[in-house]
Image: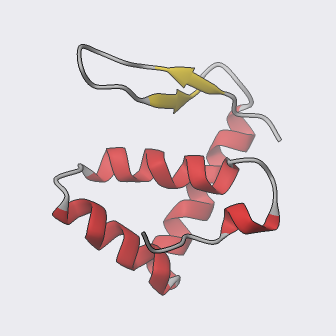
């Protein structure tokens, strides 16, 4: 799968984004996976609520979830775990 991570830090904020110049279809597929999971997968919805309470924006939360879905390709990376 494509979509390598790209550093997008500014000041004290450190973040990584998907490479927008990479495989557009892969990026779109990852985005759709996350959107569907937010609608139907209760642990993912709980993750959204928890991160919103921490003060993250929805855009930042989506970025984190896409990284979790993409993160390494193992079966375990598809499961959002509670921390």
- Report the residue that reaches farthest toward the top: 11
- Horizontal arrangement in the rendering, residue 31 relative to residue 82 (left or right): right
* Nearest the eye: 22 or 60: 60
Residue 65 vs residue 74, the one in the foreground: 74
Numbered marks: total: 0
> Is residue 46 something one can see in this rendering?
yes
Name the residue: 64% across, 19% down: 21
Quarter the N terminus occupies: top right
**Quadrant housing residue 23:** top right
Point out the image quarter for the C terminus.
bottom left
Q: Residue at x 23, y 50 (%)?
A: 56
Name the residue rendered at 65%, 41% in the picture: 27
Drawn side of residue 66 relative to residue 25, left or right:
left
Please tell me which residue is depicted at 68% across the width and 66% down the height of the picture.
78
Q: What colour scheme was applied to this rendering of the protein?
A: secondary structure
Residue 71 horizontal side relative to residue 68, left or right: right
Task: Residue 82: name its quadrant.
Answer: bottom left
Q: From what the image shows, is residue 2 above or below residue 48? A: above
Can residue 29 be spotted in the picture? no
- 63 is higher (above) or lower (below) than 36: above
30, above or below 49, in the image: above
Q: Is residue 58 above or below residue 60?
A: below
The percent coordinates of residue 17 (x first, y second) are: 50, 30
**In x, y percent, where is residue 18?**
58, 31
């Amino acid at each position: 799968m494509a979509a390598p991570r790209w550093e997008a830090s500014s000041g004290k904020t450190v973040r990584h984004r998907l490479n927008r110049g990479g495989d557009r279809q892969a990026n779109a597929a990852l985005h759709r996976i996350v959107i569907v999971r937010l609608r139907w997968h209760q642990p993912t919805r709980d993750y959204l609520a928890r991160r919103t309470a921490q003060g993250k924006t929805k855009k930042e939360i989506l970025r984190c979830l896409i990284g979790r879905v993409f993160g390494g390709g193992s079966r375990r990376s598809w499961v959002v775990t509670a921390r």
